Amino acid sequence: MTLRRGERLCLYGYSGAGKTTLLRALLGLRPRRDEVVWHIAPASVGYAAQQPRLIPRATVLQQILWCAALHAIPLSVHGSRIHELLEQWGLQAHRRRQVRQLSAGERVRLELCCAMAVASQLLVVDGLLEQLDERTRIRFWEEVDARCARRELALLYATHSAREAELADRVLVLHEGRALALDTPEHLRAHAEVEPIRLEPTSGADKAILQARWQGDGEPHLIIQRTPTMEDVLQALLRRGGLR
Amino acid sequence: MRVLLRLWAMCLRLILTSPFYWIPLAVALWAWWRHALSEWVWAGASAAAAAIALSLAMFLECAGGLLERVRLAQAGRLVLAAGSAALLTLSLLMWAAGMMVLR
């Protein structure tokens, strides 16, 4: 499996599928058997962990500046970049507050903000996207899409949300520590069969009106063929035991 | 240089806001006053307290999250240099305070 510049790769699966384990092994934060070849400097990787790793005694501004300093990025308090980040993540008003005073949602945003501040080539996000409010989520995807389109950044993220998985260029479907499939969402959808939705009138009056106008066979009905979601794909792959 | 200064400030703040620095320091102060220890012992005790506070912040705070960030950024040497500089700064300050105020 190769992650290319500008690509968005999603690790998708239910809780306990091994998404976090795989991400942490890839990043060298836990032992691994296979080799991972990095063609980029480790310091250019921004990692937002499932459990935010923030210093409770630091202020929001200090937390971001310290994270940047660890990655040898000299962010300035007076520079525009730090204020762009604070604005983007809705943390500008909280910049002087201590991390311990933040709500759970604000901590998630700060963890992602720190990762974004240091990710010059690769952003790794472990299951935080589904915790974002809609406005921040949209801003996150706008920024990531723009940077991926310019081929500045690659995104590797883990999620159990079908909605987030749909936004990837490629999806690695995991279940109980096993890779079931790796392909684009479009190709994966082709492997999922979904039952069409059949609508029939139930009340007598509606049924009588429709019956009078109905020109097809049998009872009047409407069939809606829905597009398979990633959840349908996962269910189909589980039934078949993977693509291979 | 700016990066190193920022990490030095981080280490200083982590030490100075930690109870694991101030409690041993208070004990050392009491011992120094009670047993008339030399300024060097006082400075050494303050350096040890600072080292303990910084290590605990690195390894224990947010379940070792800071250490994980350091590992991921491969910034071990940078943090070691900044931490050592912060310990030295505090020890010198405490030694100077011992010489001037507490003597």
Image (cartoon, rainbow, N blue to C red):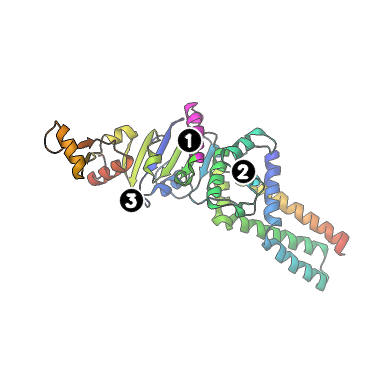
**In the rendered structure, does residue A221 fall within the stretch colored magenta?**
no
Residue occupied by mark 1:
A141
B47 left or right of A94 in image: right
Q: Quick one: label 2, few (<14), some, or many (20+) residues within 10 Å?
A: many
Residue occupied by mark 2:
A64
Residue A215, x across and y down, in percent: 14, 30
Q: Residue at x 57, y 45 (%)?
A: A110
Label ID, residue A172:
none
Q: Compute the Cα span from label 1 to label 3.
A: 28 Å
Query: Could you tell me if the residues under marks 1 and 3 are in contact, i.e. CB atoms within 8 Å?
Result: no
**Pointers 3 and 2 within a single chain:** yes
Query: Could you tell me if the residues under marks 2 and 1 are in contact, i.e. CB atoms within 8 Å?
Result: no
**Pointers 2 and 1 within a single chain:** yes
**In the rendered structure, does residue A148 fall within the stretch colored magenta?**
yes
Residue occupied by mark 3:
A176
Residue B20, x across and y down, in percent: 67, 62
**Mark 2: which secondary structure?**
helix
**Foreground residue among A148 and B59:** A148
Amino acid at pointer 3: Glu
